[in-house]
Amino acid sequence: MTTEIGPRVFYGWWILLAAVTVNIIGGGTAIYGLTLFIKPVVAEFNWSYLEVSSAIAITGVLVGVLSPIIGGFVDRFGSRKVVLISSILVGTGFIILSFTSSIFVFYLAFAVMAAGVGGIGSIPLQAVIGNWFRRRMGFAMGITSTGVGLGGLILPVIAWLILTWDWRTASLAVGIGICIIMPALAMVLRHRPEDYGYHPDGEKPSPLFQTAEPAGKGEKRPADGITAGKALRTNTFWLLAVAYSIYFMALNAVILHIAPFLQSVELEPSTAALLATTLAIISNIGRIGYGYLGDRIPRRYAFAITFLSQSLGLVVVLFAPSAWALGLFIFLYGTGYGGSVALSSAMTREYFGRTSFGAIQGWFFASTTFAGMVGPMFAGWIFDINQSYNVAWMVFAVANACGIASVLALKRVPAADGAS
């Protein structure tokens, strides 16, 4: 079963469009949008910020713990079913949030969201993109990851709903919207191209890349990668896990503390907010640019450059509030972390193949959960002691430099050769 290359649009691009849109909605509501509900909830119930923010922290831990399970579901049942069910869970979480009457209900809402957030993110979406693209995999994954950054465009809509009505109505509207729109987008997804008569990139198979014919019902598909269990026993997995942990540790700290940092160097709150938004937008250049570069040069070299860029960005930000330092920081760190996010999934696909992409990616998420929590806490602790973030930025700069060595030490996994 092959697909002729002709004027018809390759179906993988429609899947890419659906994946980007899912990321936009998920990023704008379940990642960036939650911050808009914190202040009105605190004002209504007179809870402490610790009580409220702990719900978000617990959500992050639950997502990390559930990631390997979600990845296994993706490999077994396909991305469409996982996104479909997960989107309903996220929407239901927002609906429950709108009926909050106690701290228990508030935590329940976040727990339900946590059960679904991992299933509408990079694990199922990058898995399906990795199945449908090979030669243009880095570029396609980079495009997909831009959706999360573009999700910030939804924030003004949520803010308008809260100001026009109230936070409960806004949360209910968001929940219902997710339950309607995301399942429809999930129906566009198709897990593997071979099942529909396609091949990755819409090309005919060649001697350099022979794709297995689709397996019929009851038949086992030939492996084109290694299992999660085998991946966990390789040095390559743990070298990548270290690299991912390093950039997640610094990234989570920067995202959470960038606005307070900019205000600590005497910038106006409005200016700090604008620069923080610009950082997220600039990251999209890195997601697309480094994704494209990774398709043109050995991907580990492109990945190493993203770590160098982040490290240099964290060094120059020490000279803030100088305009040149802030501008260079936003460009270097923004493009660097965007590139890391885009290339991480492509690295998983390249080194371990497609057989257990979802489960392996899930284990990577689980392995980086601790580092993602430690980074923001460390930065806050440093500021409490010194009333300055500079020591934290230097530590993260050195850590990212060490990440370069981890990436360059990567070696091919023999059992997965030919899977990419």
Image (cartoon, grey):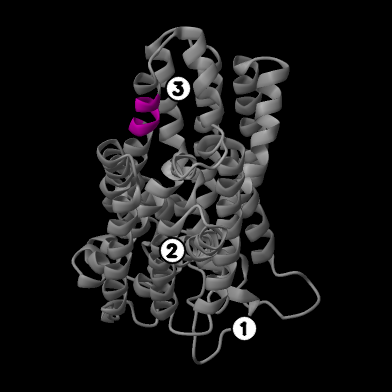
Residue at left offset 81%, top offset 76%? 7
Name the residue located 49 percent from the left edge and 63 percent from the top edge: 342
Which secondary structure lies at badge 3?
A: helix
Q: Nearer the viewer, mark 3 or mark 1?
A: 3
The residue that disc 2 covers is 316
The image shows residue 167 at horizontal and vertical percentages of: 60, 18
User: Which three-letter amino acid code belongs to the residue tagged 2?
Assistant: Val
Q: Earlier in the sequence, mark 1 or mark 2?
A: 1
Give the magenta range. 53-58
Mark 3 highlights which residue? 109
- Circle 2 residues within 10 Å: few <14, some 14–19, many ≥20: many
Q: What main secondary structure does the magenta stretch of the protein show?
A: helix
Looking at the rendered image, the quarter that the N terminus falls into is bottom right
Tell me the distance, in whole angstroms, between the alpha carbons under discs 3 and 1: 47 Å
Instruction: For residue 252, say whether it is visible.
Output: yes
Q: Give the residue number, with chain letter if any, for mark 1.
A: 204
